Image (tube, rainbow, N blue to C red):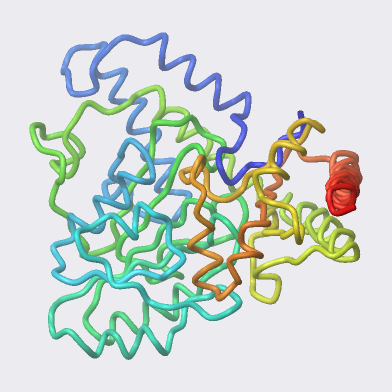
């Protein structure tokens, strides 16, 4: 199986697996003061140091959570802002992360409409929080977070950035983004599932949403997931090295898109800055689920959209926000490459895509006849 679904979950690297194994071999609650507890605490703090270094933050400003979804919910619900605005292409854990979330439109290329954001922030009259993802999980489109942050700060708003898809793919840090709150997810950058983080910028503070314990400096109750955090830290330490692979992935993605477009494919977000590994591609006339199943049988793992939407039949809210007709959205798959991806796999995928289109087209012609 050639794995082309890294935006859903990136493969765990050997060093990460070893860090998790070592943590599983230790016994101790990180809140306990005895020796075993101190060993567990050291693992948590080492992970915290690595995650903080990844985004240029202070370690004590890293709040560990059970994943990116919880981190997004903590940002929206814990920041104490009465009004929340979010880009229309945000992850569902942001768009549904509070009781009321006002959506800011995006341009046809998928990038946040900064003019619309500025206008919306002049209205309302209550303290606001603006949530803008750094890179979209379906299209790879990179949003102008720093520009959005400048607008938000002029209007007295906080800025939250879900940066889950960015580490190891593009260079960034909290200072350059201007983010007050930033979400990370371990399994998106090659760490284990079950760990995420909300990173607080200078002066930002949150109120715990989970109650019943004083962990994470009283910002998030519950015993820390020591093995997952250890793996998260190992993955964070390796993520900057992955940036050296970005040009190779961009070359493979561009090759793939050029060849598919020549056979009638449509690529969404191609005229905007994007992650180097991500492509949102329509095979006109062929349903997304048919493509996913056909390519799976051919040995390729791809997605029909965000992994959190698996099993749903409605078209992507991301493509809808970009003005993509529903018929085209229902024929779109997401291809996301990663460090194990080879030139041979990409060439084979192109061949499998061509073969699937010919097969489905021939079947449709036979039915019509």
Q: Residue furthest front?
A: 369
Which residue corresponds to the image point at 56% horizontal and 76% vertical from the top-left? 323
Residue nearest the observer in this picture, 348 or 293? 293
Which residue corresponds to the image point at 15% horizontal and 76% vertical from the top-left? 127
- Residue 196 drawn at (x, y percent): 38, 41
Q: Which residue lies furthest to the left in this view?
A: 212
- Residue 283 drawn at (x, y percent): 76, 57
How many callouts does the rendering have?
Answer: 0
Q: Quadrant for residue 352, please give it.
A: top right
On-image quarter of the N terminus? top right
Q: Is residue 327 above or below residue 187?
A: below
Does residue 21 appear left or right of residue 256 in this picture? left
Q: Quadrant for residue 88, please give it.
A: bottom left
- Residue 133 drawn at (x, y percent): 44, 63
Residue nearest the observer in this picture, 12 or 121? 121
Which residue corresponds to the image point at 82% horizontal and 53% vertical from the top-left? 252
Residue nearest the observer in this picture, 238 or 291? 291
Does residue 61 appear left or right of residue 108 in this picture? left
Which residue corresponds to the image point at 28% horizontal and 25% vertical from the top-left? 41
- Residue 55 drawn at (x, y percent): 45, 54
């Amino acid at each position: 199986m050639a794995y082309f679904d890294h935006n859903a979950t990136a493969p765990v690297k050997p060093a990460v697996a070893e860090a998790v194994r070592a943590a599983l071999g230790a016994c101790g609650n990180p809140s306990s003061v005895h020796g075993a507890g101190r060993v567990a605490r050291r693992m948590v703090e080492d992970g915290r140091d690595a995650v903080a270094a990844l985004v240029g933050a202070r370690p004590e400003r890293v709040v560990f959570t059970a994943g990116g979804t919880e981190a997004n919910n903590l940002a929206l619900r814990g920041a104490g802002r009465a009004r929340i605005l979010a880009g229309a292409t945000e992850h569902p854990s942001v768009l549904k992360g509070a009781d009321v979330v006002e959506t800011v439109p995006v341009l046809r290329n998928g990038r946040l409409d900064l003019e619309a954001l500025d206008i919306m922030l002049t209205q309302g009259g209550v303290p606001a929080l603006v949530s803008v993802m750094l890179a979209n999980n379906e299209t790879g489109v990179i949003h102008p977070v720093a520009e959005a942050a400048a607008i938000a700060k002029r209007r007295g708003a906080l800025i939250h950035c879900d940066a889950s898809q960015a580490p190891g793919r593009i260079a960034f840090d909290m200072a350059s983004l201007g983010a007050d709150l930033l979400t990370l997810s371990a399994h998106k950058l090659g760490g284990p599932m079950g760990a995420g983080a909300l990173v607080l910028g200078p002066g930002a503070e949150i109120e715990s949403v989970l109650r019943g314990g004083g962990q994470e400096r009283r910002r998030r109750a519950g015993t820390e997931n020591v093995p997952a955090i250890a793996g998260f830290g190992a993955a964070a330490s390796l993520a900057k090295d992955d940036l050296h692979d970005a040009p190779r992935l961009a070359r493979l993605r561009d090759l793939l898109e050029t060849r598919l477009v020549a056979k009638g494919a449509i690529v969404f977000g191609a005229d905007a800055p994007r992650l180097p590994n991500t492509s949102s591609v329509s095979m006109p006339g062929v349903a997304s689920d048919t493509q996913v199943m056909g390519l799976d049988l051919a040995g390729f793992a791809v997605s029909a959209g965000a992994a959190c939407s698996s099993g749903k039949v409605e078209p992507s809210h991301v493509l809808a926000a970009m003005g993509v007709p529903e018929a085209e959205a229902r024929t779109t798959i997401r291809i996301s490459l990663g460090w194990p991806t080879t030139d041979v796999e990409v060439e084979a995928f192109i061949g499998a895509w061509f073969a699937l289109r010919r097969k489905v087209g021939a079947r449709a012609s036979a039915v019509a006849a």
